[in-house]
Amino acid sequence: MTMTLLGKVNQIFKLNLRVSDQKETAVNYMKDRNISGESAVRFQLGFASDTWDFVKQHFKEDDKVLNELVELGVLAKMQNGHRYDRFRNRVMFPIRDVQGQIVSFGGRILGDGTPKYLNGAESSLFNKSEHLYGLFETLHVDDKPSRIVVVEGYIDVVMTHQCGVDYTVSCMGTSLTKQHLALLSEHTAEVVCCYDGDAAGEKAAIRTALLSLANPQLTLKFATLPLGEDPDTYIKDKGMAAFEQVLDNAIDANVLLMNVLANTCSTEHNTLVHQLNGLKSLLKECETPEQEIGLLEAFSEQFDVSMTALNFVIAPGESEVKKSHDKPENTTMGKPAFSI
């Protein structure tokens, strides 16, 4: 019933994009973003009117359904029990699972309201850590693509598909999770993260690269866009071939992390000390011992520092990692120890 109900809600949003007396704002927004009619149909885009009861009024006679819509994150509920539309004055993006069933929605505000993008609330059907927008559409084209590209937003997915790169997905404003990586590994051998060319995009890349250290079965790479660009703007300005060239030049996760550490100091004086301090900071971002070990091994390889020496930079309490490498090491063989 729940998935069927969300399908009904989606039909309401789609029809509203065609017949609403408020549709002009939504249509103009889509034209400004160069979203084609074909893309609107393919991704089943819709429109939520700027009222508090646009969806609610379609089901107002059925109290049970209204409560279910609250549980599914389409409606919200006040402390006094009053229910109202969660999405108002937004272009609507239905989020589908790999079977094509709608599990939630995302909405982009029209105008200056906040938040700019709003996702449906977590529910029995929808967990942002487990779903990827655009994955169904990607697999509909090719159920085993050679690579899948992770971008940041809904529009990034729609426009890259429209411009011919029809193998992009979005983690919908959240960080890529181990559940996302497990899901992607079922359908491809290579994932390329192409985040926006800004500070937030760089931080997201670092978090994801650390996560990948515990998943060696999946090749995870990172593509860098010029500062201020995102996949949507870049592919529209430069074209499909230029965007795919950026993807082809993507670097491995461990290379990205070592580049971050290598750039922590602009002079040769105390460079290694600065890099070790950077390593300590990255270690704090790791979520598992496996990630920590992967990061230490990458650092050891890149900067020619023994694992024995690196154990001294590990904070107290991270004993699982330390124990795994606290073994006698013959420093006359291989890398020399480094004392800090």
Image (spheres, rainbow, N blue to C red):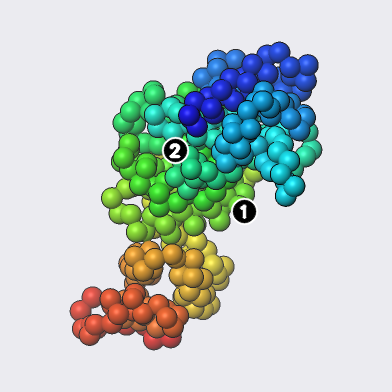
Numbered label attached to residue 199:
1
Q: Is residue 138 above or below residue 251?
A: above
Q: Residue at 33% across / 43% down in the picture?
A: 185
Name the secondary structure under disc 1.
Answer: helix
Nearer the observer: mark 2 or 1; the answer is 2
* Number of marks present in the image shown: 2
The three-letter code of the residue at mark 2 reads Val
Give percent across and percent down for residue 199: 62, 53
Q: Earlier in the sequence, mark 2 or mark 1?
A: 2
Give percent across and percent down for residue 160: 52, 29
Gap between marks 2 and 1 measured at Cα: 20 Å
Give percent across and percent down for residue 266: 57, 68
Q: Quadrant of residue 317?
A: bottom left
Q: Is residue 25 left or right of residue 189?
A: right
Label 2 CA crowd tier, 10 Å (few <14, some 14–19, many 20+): many
Relative depth, front residue between 271 and 21: 21
Residue 106 in view of the camera: no
Label 1 CA crowd tier, 10 Å (few <14, some 14–19, many 20+): few
Relative depth, front residue between 18 and 28: 18
Residue 97 in view of the camera: yes
* Residue bearing mark 2: 149
Q: Is residue 277 left or right of residue 20?
A: left
Q: Residue at 24% across / 82% down in the picture?
A: 327
The three-letter code of the residue at mark 1 reads Ala
| Residues marked 2 and 1 touching at CB (< 8 Å) | no
